[in-house]
Image (cartoon, rainbow, N blue to C red):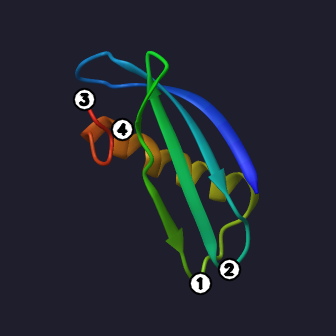
Amino acid sequence: MTIVKEVYTRKVSGESFDYELDYTQGADVAWIARVYHDGVLKGSPHGALTANVLSGPALEQYLRAYVEGMIERGLDVAE
């Protein structure tokens, strides 16, 4: 399991969110992100990739962009 901790600031509202992204590597990737605002858990978006060919930094970048897109749009993240 790989764990990434990041901060994302919404472009429209300027709100900052901390998130932890946990994911497995390999052909079948399982991932979950825990998203916090002011220390309060606001959501836990999660998912899976099948037939994955990404690894290392490319996989991390893909998942980070996906999670940050969900935060930006408020998908699976409470206000």
Callout 3 touching callout 1 (CB < 8 Å): no
Q: Which residue is mark 1?
A: 51
Q: Residue at x 44, y 51 (%)?
A: 66
Q: Specify which label sits upstream in the sequence, 2 or 4.
A: 2
Q: Which residue is mark 3?
A: 79
Q: Determine which of the numbered discs, if any, sits on residue 71 in the image.
A: 4
Q: CA distance from mark 3 to mark 1?
A: 34 Å
The local secondary structure at tag 2 comes to loop
Q: Residue at x 64, y 59 (%)?
A: 59
Q: Quadrant of residue 55?
A: bottom right
Q: Residue at x 49, y 19 (%)?
A: 39
> Left of 43 or right of it: where is 28?
right
Q: Residues within 10 Å of mark 2 (few under 14, many from 20)?
A: few
Q: Specify which label sits upstream in the sequence, 1 or 2.
A: 2
Q: CA distance from mark 4 to mark 1?
A: 25 Å
Q: Quadrant of residue 62?
A: bottom right
Q: CA distance from mark 2 to mark 3?
A: 34 Å
At label 1, the amino acid type is: Ala
Q: Specify which label sits upstream in the sequence, 2 or 3.
A: 2
Nearest to viewer (mark 4 / mark 3): 3
At label 4, the amino acid type is: Ile
